[in-house]
Image (cartoon, rainbow, N blue to C red):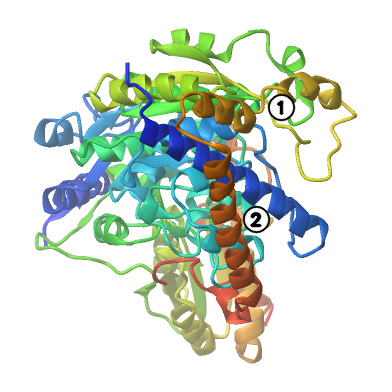
Amino acid sequence: MIRLTKAKALWIYETMVRIRRFEERSIELFQAGELPGFLHAYIGEEAVAAGVCAHLTPKDQITSTHRGHGHMIAKGLHYKGMFAELYARATGYCKGKGGSMHIADQDLGALGANGIVGGGIPIAAGAALGLKLKGENHVVVSFFGDGASNEGAFHEGINIAATWKLPAVFVCENNGFAESTPRATHQAVQDIADRAKAYGIPGIVVDGMDPQAVFEAAGEAIAHARKGRGPTLIEAKTMRFLGHYVGDPGTAYGHDKEVGKWLKRDPLITFAETLEKKKWLSKKSIDAIHEKVNKEMEEAIEFARKSPEPELDDAMTDIYATV
Amino acid sequence: MREILYREAIIEALDEEMARDDSVFLLGEDIAEFGGSYKTTVGLLDKYGAERVRNTPISEQGIIGAALGAALVGMRPVAELMYIDFSAVAMDQIVNQVAKVRYMFGGKANTSLVIRTQGGAGRSSAAQHAQSLEAWFVHVPGLKVVMPSSARDAKGLLKASIRDDDPVFFIEHKLLYLEKGAVPEEEEIIPIGVAEVKREGGDLTIVATSSMVGKSLAAAEELEKEGVSCEIIDPRTLFPLDTETILASIRKTGRLLITHEAVQRCGWGAEIAALAAKDAFDYLDAPIERVCAKETPVPFSPKLESYVIPGKDDVIAGVRGMLETV
């Protein structure tokens, strides 16, 4: 088993803080009317992105979802480009043409958030195929939700990756609700990881509120993939603390009743306590991390606010490489 | 010049590009040992091995998604959809992913991939194996759409498509695979976006795609005997479109007939009619005519199929009708 070192543990903690604070500020800015479009907040699920991405290099690739900010931050994308994108500015990761659901940076191995549920899964299989054909020992992690596990793309993508023993890891963030639909209404299986058996690959259920458990499970799956032994399906049981999108109170489908017991397991609190017990963190160092993150964030927000909007002509560029 | 089959021209293009560039590889259903349902990949498995000539599960969205993912990390995949009808199964990947990522990601995405497929009727393949769906893809910004009508174009345009940095939807025709045509032995790249004047004439312009090019040429031969001189333009690529060649011909002849195997309504021909009506309005001496498939699913019965799909005689009738209206 890959042990969680102090350096990795601190990276995971700080990454979770970076995600949480990014989402909290985005929500404030959205509610203040500064950001167009809509937002899907990752708050509550931070342990998954941070625990998995702790193993990845910039050459490793990820595909993500509509709830993608956490994955992008954990993959190393910077606040400035992300906030500028949310503000629809020319300096954003997508020059203001993608928005929250399409943030990507090929240079950092982020093959994109994705507005289509399950859309990234076959793409991840293909990226893993490409890396294998190039003879590069990198892996691809595909993040998706419980809802995506009922899409044909899930079946097709994982079956291809399993059949070809591609260096991919499929991480299902099971937050119990496919938008507003609870598990029992959309699937008969209790554990989505059971579906791995249908593809002849390992399936692992992990506590998605426990960064260490996620780190260990992901470490094993990624090592397995790097050795050429094929993909793993990891199901991380987790919970978004907010509604499906910012503005959804979650009251129509029982989310508000379900979420209480999960709030007690907030990974930012529990993991900080764990690390404090190990003397790897102190109140003072926690404050210092928050201060650093907040400072960087406010600078990024100012950068985004001051950045120019795209020119009208920009609407007609980047459609083709050449015409 | 030597003559080879259209399907052999496809094999040659794939072979040459795979030999030239290690990042080119093939994936699709039954393309390896079996050589493809229409024998367009025969011999390539033996030459390049199973890593680069990959049989896939019957998973069309998986195939296209895998091609896109591989392109994003720097490969140049050529994915085969056995029938254009099956593109409907893969539409999310084609329309929402392949066509969009470059734009959505602000231009930072490698999307050099080719989706090869074939369409068209004429073999009693019925409604799910004989459609002409090219207009769907022309309608999506982010895709280029190529539709070769001859062996020479098939080879030269496929090579250009593989080298292109954009996703190319490459539509072959199942009846053309066994047609022979002159193809130079030396390398030839036919650029995307350049139409070809297949026949010069002064009375009327026929814009024809894919299988309708040959039928139009045959129609023009007969019409010539009646003293009618047709000019035939094959756009070869539906997007980007060589509008200048088409418009120049209309300005010369004053009459436009558009013919394709797809059904008429919202067909690609409507776009050409609109182009002519706007940019060659003052030159038109007659209403624009379209000769297209009847608006029905493709029937199985050979008798009904040939009734529904436009043929040489339909082109001739269309031309005669236009000349009478003057």
Q: Report the side of A76 relative to A236 (left or right).
A: left
Q: Residue furthest bottom?
A: B282
- How far from the left and from the top, in percent, is residue B324? 65, 76
Which residue is denoted by mark 1 in the rendering? Answer: A178
Above or below residue B41? Residue B267 is below
Amino acid type of the residue tagged 2 in the rendering: Gln
Q: Circle 2: is it few (<14), some (14-19), or many (20+) Cα within 10 Å?
A: some
User: Is disc 2 placed on a helix, strand or loop?
Assistant: loop
Q: Is residue B309 at least partly visible in the picture?
A: no
Quarter occupied by the N terminus of chain B: bottom left
**Residue at 48 percent of width and 58 percent of height:** B143
Q: Is residue A39 at least partly visible in the picture?
A: yes
- How far from the left and from the top, in percent, is residue B56? 35, 27
- How far from the left and from the top, in percent, is residue A71? 52, 41
**Residue at 70 percent of width and 31 percent of height:** A240
B81 or A106: which is nearer to us?
A: A106
B221 or B136: which is nearer to us?
A: B136
Above or below residue B169? Residue A154 is above
Q: Report the side of B285 relative to B115 (left or right).
A: right
Which residue is denoted by mark 2 in the rendering? Answer: B264
- How far from the left and from the top, in percent, is residue B219? 45, 63
User: Is disc 1 placed on a helix, strand or loop?
Assistant: strand
**Residue at 56 percent of width and 76 percent of height:** A314
Amino acid type of the residue tagged 1 in the rendering: Ala
The span from disc 2 to disc 1 (Cα, nearest Å) is 41 Å
Q: Circle 1: is it few (<14), some (14-19), or many (20+) Cα within 10 Å?
A: some
